[in-house]
Amino acid sequence: MIQICYTSRAKASLDRARYNALVLEAQGRNRADDVTGLLLYDGARFIQALEGPERLASACMARIEQDRRHEAIDIVSRTRIPERQFGTFAMAALMPDDRDNATFVRTIKTFVENVEPAHVKALFIGFAVLSRSRGDMGLVSHL
């Protein structure tokens, strides 16, 4: 089992409908490929963790790297893990809305409380805190 975490920058801001379509597409592929994870989007940037069998998670990452909706992809962590760290969601996903800062950050901390390595947990919490300071993220779905 492998966990891949990356960040990237959106080439264009996604509205709710386009973001939901992206998430539904990813969830369908991930279910078929036994890949799970978490995706955060703040209107400008993405951070995502993918987990699954090495061959399948690596193939998923290769597809993501070819996706023209984002750029400046930086793989920040590629780690072997004994078991899934982000649960069994095909893709838990968050996007802009009007939730209050404290609730949003608590939600992210709950999602990542058992995540190892610790630097991946810190990346997600830091992303959530910084994004909330801009006031533009909230929970969408965790299917």
Image: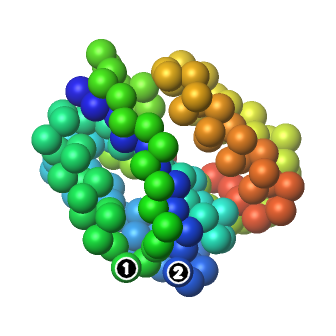
Q: Residue at x 52, y 55 (%)?
A: 7
Q: Residue at x 25, y 63 (%)?
A: 63
Q: Is residue 116 above or below residue 126?
A: above
Which image quarter: residue 73?
A: bottom left
From the viewer's perspective, is 122 left or right of 7?
right
Residue identified by numbered label 2: 11
**Distance CA(mark 1)–CA(mark 2):** 8 Å
Q: Residues within 10 Å of mark 1 (few under 14, many from 20)?
A: few
Tell whether label 2 touches label 1 (CB within 8 Å): yes
Q: Residue at x 28, y 31 (%)?
A: 2
From the viewer's perspective, is 14 left or right of 49?
right
Q: Residue at x 44, y 38 (%)?
A: 77
Instruction: Label 2: state its secondary structure.
Output: loop
Amino acid at dot 1: Arg
**Residue 72 visible:** yes
Q: Nearer the viewer, residue 137 or 61?
A: 61
Q: Nearer the viewer, residue 46 or 112?
A: 46
Residue identified by numbered label 1: 68
Q: Residues within 10 Å of mark 2 (few under 14, many from 20)?
A: few
Q: Position of residue 120 (x, y in %)?
A: 54, 32
From the viewer's perspective, is 123 left or right of 137?
left
